[in-house]
Image (spheres, rainbow, N blue to C red):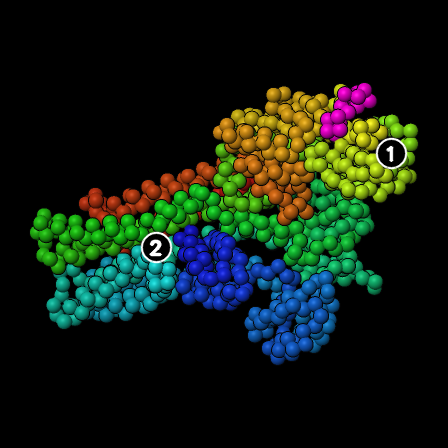
Amino acid sequence: MTCSGCGNKLTRTLEAIPGVSNVRVSFVMGSADFDINPQTSKVEEVIRTAERETGFRCARTTSDDQFIDLLMTGESVKALSDIMPAGVKQIDVLDKLTARITYDPTVVGARSLVLSLGDRTTGLAPPRADASAAGGRRRLRDMLIKTTLAAVFTIPVVVLAWGNTLVDDRSRAYISIVFATVVQALSVPEFYRPAISSLIFSRTVEMDMLVVISVSAAYLYSVIAFGFSMAGKPLDTKEFFETSTLLITLVLLGRLIAAFARIRAIAAVSLRSLQVSTAVLIEAEGTREVDARLLQFGDRFMIMPHAQIPTDGQVTEGSSEVDESMLTGESLPVGKQHGAQIIAGTINGSGRLTARLTRLPGKNTVTDIANLVEEASNTKPRVQELADKVAGYFVPVVTAIAVITIIVWVVVSLRIRNESAGKAISTAITYAIAVLAVSCPCALGLAVPMVLVVAGGVAARGGVVIKSAEPIERGHKITDVVFDKTGTLTIGELDVVVEEILSTDRGQAVSLAKALVGDNKHPVSMAVAKHLEKQDHKAVHLEDIRVIPGAGVEATWNGSSFRAGNAHWLGVDQMLEVDRLLQQGMTTLCLTKDTELLAVLGLTSVLRPEAAAVVHELQARKITVHLVSGDEERAVETVAKTVGIPEQNAAARRSPAEKRVYVQDLIKRGKRVAFCGDGTNDAVAIAQANIGIQLGSSSDVTRATADVVLLSGLDGIIYLLEVSKASFRRIMFNFVWSAVYNVLAILLAAGAFVRVRIPPAYAGLGEIVSVLPVIIAALTMSGMKRPATV
């Protein structure tokens, strides 16, 4: 695929197949994903149909299951298929010596599976490259061969055409028609086959058809002129085989450059390369280095100083600092000790760590983020739909211009220049060929997707995981940013600093509080549960437990109603014991029996170190900052004042539904709103905002409902805005360049300026001239770095 037009063709083809739905195609990544109803169609049938109707080579590349590639003969594969060992789901033959075994890693591990096969396999097959990268390299290799061969046969034709005295006319004509025919044959799989397939199966005329018409016209006219010349009746305009050959070669050269740029774009977004190929496995007999693909659940592995971590795990021994900048963008190393989580692809510091495997290679955090980046490149923002709509009119408009060009130049040649009919027709044809060949919608087709793919990869390397194309498109338009408080502007963990038990039975109050907050994942409940677990009182068994989002928890015990939550919800915020803590700006959790206050706990939170700087930077960019929280007024006011948010933009005691209403009201007033929360009680507000942002960890990227996940702090918001702004500038440049190029090029090719024109032989340069600036503009983003500080 060379541009979004190819992607649209594949999309239309897949959508027309019964049982196929939710089709998403990324031409840059060379991939498509879709849902399929197995009762209606089979994947193999879909692939065959797509190949037949588009001319693309397709293969099934992804699976949710774990697999391992082994060196096996066909006989061994057949024998294994007959017995199908426990845990093995499927066996696919990749080539004569390699088979892919799909298995359930919870039933059988990779090493155990290989050992059970015995002499049926000679070991692991060499690792296969990422499918998108491998496809890009195949495309580059294919285009390099075609372009080189075309150039080898084109150069003699051009030299003979321009050097009139090198050989006699008859020899030149014979050599030219033979070499031009070879070049024409080279163009069949690249231009003719896709264009004709699209016309027959999809009923559409695409960009390749313009190339086909122009080179066919030049070649066929030259063949006819050659025939008349050999018959001794030469036409006024002799054969010009150099036009069709040079056209084909230059267009192929343009596509060769585009293929190279695509590989660069994939490299810019690829995170899979962060995965290391070997691991130091710890066994009863000692340690040994194994292929990382052989790791299995239950394994412990060692990370040597300054080594790359092979997969996700939990530290069981040792301490060190780990550089996570390649995933989070955070330049400072992160301390790791017993119980800490480590991430695949990150780099250990000077200490030695022992870890227990928690996720397998190929299904870990690196692949989660890589999959999200690739899925984001498959989504189509509104600006891309506009570009596709314009490109849809391109071919018929250019064809109409070519027809008008023929008519105008025939009239001009006959009436004004007094040329013969044959000369007039040949002149008009050369101008029309130039118009068809020089026009190029590829720049328009590349304008958006190339930028979005690079932007998504650059953002991910800076710790900002963008899950769809919309945040990149909308980010630079944001006027208001709304923050949650607990876990967002403050760190997720709170400390209980005051505990007042008002009940006469302290033990019972503690047991009730433990039971109410024990299973709640809200930061306040978790902090209280952590505080109470130190006290030697067991939680009681409650009935009818019900969580009230943004308020607290209620349940019944021994016929009484017990509640734990914020003071306002419980109606105890005016009580002296509670009011004193609220006046100090503390967050409170109160415990009541019916309407009687049994206990109150005061918690303090710590602001994120970057919070004030982020708020200041947003305000410096003329973005209005808001704080909306379910906490008490004084606590919210204290945080707002500390970070510099105006009092009128700070809202307290807001339930999740009320947070959503707050965001909705801003949008109704014409604001473009980003909501940033920690995902605990923010889902509805995150969904309501124009851009939903969740502050999370690497383990949250797939579970997060937000459009964007920040892996390393609030300053990721600033980086998101920077990436969006840079993307917007490049997309606008690409649109303007595409329009300016096509208008000027078509006018020059059509002879509108009479004395200055683009000869048809050079019109193929249009592929390079139009596409190269677009590609360069997109790839310049790959050098963007997340600033160390806001």
Residue 166 is situated, as x and y percent measured from the top left of the image, at 23, 64
Q: Residue under circle 1?
A: 509
Q: Is residue 125 visible?
A: no
Q: Amino acid at mark 1?
A: Ala
Secondary element type, mark 1: helix
Badge 1 density bin: few <14, some 14–19, many ≥20, Cα 10 Å: many
Instruction: Name the N-terminal-most of marks 1 and 2.
Output: 2
Front residue of 374 and 556: 556
Residue 199 badge: none
Front residue of 759 and 469: 469
Looking at the rendered image, the quarter that the N terminus falls into is bottom left
Residue 349 is situated, as x and y percent measured from the top left of the image, at 73, 46
Badge 2 density bin: few <14, some 14–19, many ≥20, Cα 10 Å: many
Residue 77 is situated, as x and y percent measured from the top left of the image, at 62, 76
Secondary element type, mark 2: helix
- Stretch in magenta: 566-580
Q: Is residue 651 above or below residue 396?
A: above
Looking at the rendered image, the quarter that the C terminus falls into is top right
- Which quarter of the picture shows residue 481? top right
- Which quarter of the picture shows residue 468? top right
Residue 83 is situated, as x and y percent measured from the top left of the image, at 68, 76
Front residue of 605 and 295: 605
Q: Residue under circle 2?
A: 207
Q: Residue at x 29, y 66 (%)?
A: 180
